[in-house]
């Protein structure tokens, strides 16, 4: 259920086609290795998997923080693309929400947590722009399902995204990656619990993006 959207890089100057391909290979390799091994994986190992030299990595990304930020933004961009696709679906509103949630689990959002907690600027304009756009799109998907009477009204953006992050665990670097094969099954159980009419009253209040930032 993964989206195929790719992030448009934001280098200072326009890249040649071969340089652009190298940049994309580096980001893809880094995303895979950060997910598998965590954000401290050696850059030369990333270069080896990408099939480029160390100098090529540093030419595109002057330090680890720049590469980590690009990977985080890339995953968020793909999540935004999944949300945009869900909003174009004209059929069942709850099914569109389900499609987005499953695509988000495939992005292994929880593996980003150690990276987001690293030293790079969490308020970088690229990251903040994508984060705000993602929140708006997901809220629109959920509002549409609520308006159709299919999504219980007492859940918010944060409730969905916390569940997606939890169900896309284990975090990077663990040895229990086989748990991934259960993620979509358990996600569907959770989504079924979001359907209206609700069978119980939830404790507390719906989680917002601000709640997640303060957590």
Image (spheres, rainbow, N blue to C red):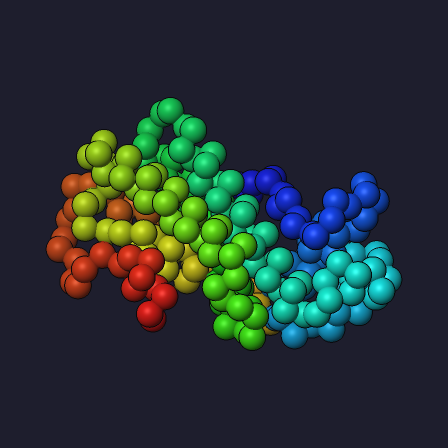
In the image, what residue occupies the spot 19% across and 45% down? 153
Q: Is residue 123 above or below residue 126?
A: below
Q: How many marks?
A: 0
Residue farthest to the left, as pictured: 201
Quarter occupied by residue 36: bottom right
Quarter of the image containing the C terminus?
bottom left
Q: Residue reaching furthest front? A: 13
Is 66 displayed left or right of 134 in the figure?
right
- x and y percentages locating residue 23 in the rendered image: 75, 52
Residue 15 located left or right of residue 161: right
| Residue at figure coordinates x 65%, y 74% from the top left | 40
Nearer the observer, 194 or 21: 21
Residue 87: horizontal and vertical position, in percent? 40, 33
Residue 116: give x, y in percent of width and height. Answer: 51, 67
**Residue 156 in view:** yes
For residue 183, say whether it is visible: no
Q: Is residue 35 left or right of residue 179?
A: right
Q: Residue at x 74, y 73 (%)?
A: 42
Closer to the camera in the image, 29 or 171: 29
Q: Quadrant of residue 6?
A: top right
- Residue 50: x and y, percent? 78, 57
Left of 50 or right of it: where is 37? left
């Amino acid at each position: 259920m993964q989206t195929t959207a790719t992030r448009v890089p934001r280098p200072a100057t326009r890249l040649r086609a071969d340089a652009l391909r190298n940049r994309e290979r580096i980001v893809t390799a880094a995303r895979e290795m950060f997910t598998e091994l965590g954000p401290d994986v050696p850059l030369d190992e990333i270069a080896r998997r990408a099939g480029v030299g160390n100098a090529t990595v540093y030419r595109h990304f002057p330090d680890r923080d720049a590469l980590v930020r690009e990977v985080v933004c890339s995953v968020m961009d793909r999540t935004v693309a999944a949300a945009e696709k869900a909003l174009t679906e004209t059929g069942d509103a709850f099914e569109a929400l389900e499609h987005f949630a499953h695509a988000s689990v495939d992005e292994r959002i929880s593996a980003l947590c150690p990276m987001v907690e690293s030293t790079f600027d969490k308020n970088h304009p690229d990251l903040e722009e994508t984060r705000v756009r993602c929140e708006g799109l997901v809220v629109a998907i959920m509002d549409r399902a609520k308006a159709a009477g299919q999504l219980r009204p007492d859940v918010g953006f944060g409730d969905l995204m916390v569940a997606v992050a939890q169900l896309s665990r284990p975090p990077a670097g663990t040895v229990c990656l086989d748990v991934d094969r259960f993620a979509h099954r358990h996600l569907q159980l959770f989504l079924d619990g979001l359907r209206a009419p609700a069978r119980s009253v939830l404790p507390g209040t719906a989680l917002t993006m601000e709640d997640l930032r303060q957590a």
